[in-house]
Image: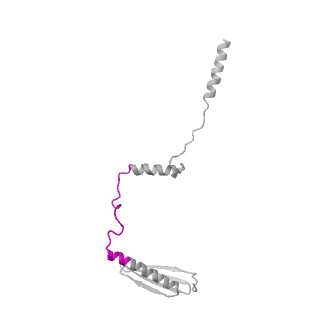
Amino acid sequence: MMRSSFSLVFLFFIFSRVAVATELVYTPVNPSFGGNPLNGNYLLNNASAQNSKKDPDSGKSPYSDSSSLDRFTDTLESRLLSQLLTDVGNGNDGTLVTDDYIVNIIDLDGQLTITITDAVTGEISEIVVVGLNPSN
């Protein structure tokens, strides 16, 4: 009897050591939710590999829909607007009129007023910048 109780205590001692429990901690996989940042490329590549949708505009150039004349006109308008802003920086006022809009820039003692009028709808946007140094 003593031997069986001793072996029972011994078995209880052995199994109590093996059955130590710890708390479960959840760690997210997605880096957006606190997971390891190194998982980002792996998850993105897996999602891209499973994506069966194709972008219809992926092979198109942004200039493919416009003609050479349209691109030249856009570039020229951009250059003229840049020159107008440079002239205002030198103390001159100016206006730029295109088919789409009218830009009027006035610098009055450090207060820069830019008025943009949509030529199609007639809507007017005004931008006022105060505190510019007129000597610059």
Type of secondary structure dominating the magenta stretch: loop
Q: Is residue 109 magenta?
A: no
Instruction: Inspect this view and state whether residue 116 appears.
Output: no
Instruction: Please identify the quadrant where the C terminus is shown.
Output: bottom right
Q: Is residue 50 above or below residue 96?
A: above
Left or right: 17, with 27 as reference point? right
Q: Residue at x 33, y 59 (%)?
A: 56
**Residue 61 showing in the rendered view:** yes
Q: Nearer the viewer, residue 66 or 5?
A: 66
Q: Which image quarter: residue 78?
A: bottom left
Q: How many marks?
A: 0
Position of residue 65 measured from the top left corner of the image (x, y, whole percent)? 32, 69
Q: Is residue 62 above or below residue 74?
A: above
Task: Identify the residue shown where x is 63% and y is 26%.
Answer: 16
The part of the chain drawn in magenta is 50-74
> Up-down: is 91 above or below 28?
below
- Residue 13, position as x, y percentages in the image: 65, 24
Instruction: Name the one closer to the observer, 120 or 83.
Output: 83
In the visual, does 59 lie left or right of 5? left
Colouring used for the render: one colour
Asked whether residue 51 is drawn in magenta, I would say: yes
Q: In screen coordinates, is 133 left or right of 120?
A: right
Query: Measuring 41% from the left and 52% from the top, which residue is drawn there?
Result: 48
Query: Residue 131 at what x, y percent from top left?
Result: 58, 81
Image quarter (top left, top right, bottom left or bottom right) of the N terminus: top right
